[in-house]
Image (cartoon, grey):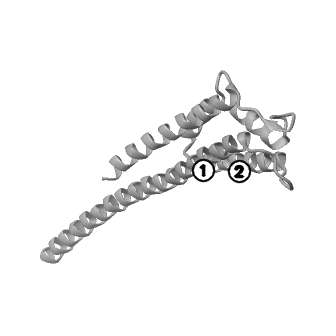
Amino acid sequence: MEKIDLILTGVSAICTFLSGFGAYKSVRYFRKSKQLTIYAKTNVAYTEIQTIKSTMIELLKLSNKKQGRGTNLSQQIGKNGELIKRCIENIRDHLPVEKCAEIQELLDHEKTKVEEYIDSFITGNVLIEEKLMIDDDFNNCQQVFGQIQTSLKKYLEELAETLK
């Protein structure tokens, strides 16, 4: 009887060890999977900021474009403003809370409230005599979007290091 108890105790100890090892691997996999998900979502946010930057370039082109027949500058600028607004929301949706707060801080720039300025594209308030005027607010917005892009790129690099 004692031999059987000793064998069962040994089997039980081995099973306990294997269960603990499996739990350890499971937790490690979960953490890595979570980091990978954050990395993928941050990559989506980075793509969105690139879209914003290219849209700002399109707006810059529209400011120099002559009004042709059948074109509605206000409508084109409004669509670009809506695109930027959607991209900002997608960035917020894909980033962790602490990173989102950092982005919001950049958007609430001391000189230009970026989101209010983008809203003026949508409403058409940015147009002066049916022309888009490139002013300090526009340039400040471009700088803010550049800072956001740099911040996201740095964050992606940090995440990539943790995944190695």
Q: Is residue 21 above or below residue 41?
A: below
Whether pointer 1 and pointer 2 mark residues with C-beta atoms closer than 8 Å, the reply is yes
Dot 1 amino acid type: Thr
**Which disc number belongs to residue 148?**
none
6 with respect to 32 (left or right): left
Say what secondary structure mark 1 lies in.
helix
Marks 1 and 2, the one that precedes in the sequence: 1
Where residue 46 appears, x then y in whole percent? 52, 48
Residue 12: horizontal and vertical position, in percent? 24, 69
Badge 2: few (under 14), some or many (20 or more) residues near its Cα, within 10 Å? some
**Circle 1 residue:** 51
Q: Looking at the image, is 68 positioned above or below residue 144?
A: below
Which percent across, then down, holds residue 79? 77, 51
Q: Which mark is residue 83?
A: 2
Quarter of the rendering containing residue 96: top right
Q: Quadrant of the N terminus?
A: bottom left
> How many residues crowd around disc 1 within 10 Å: few (fewer than 14), some, or many (20 or more)?
some
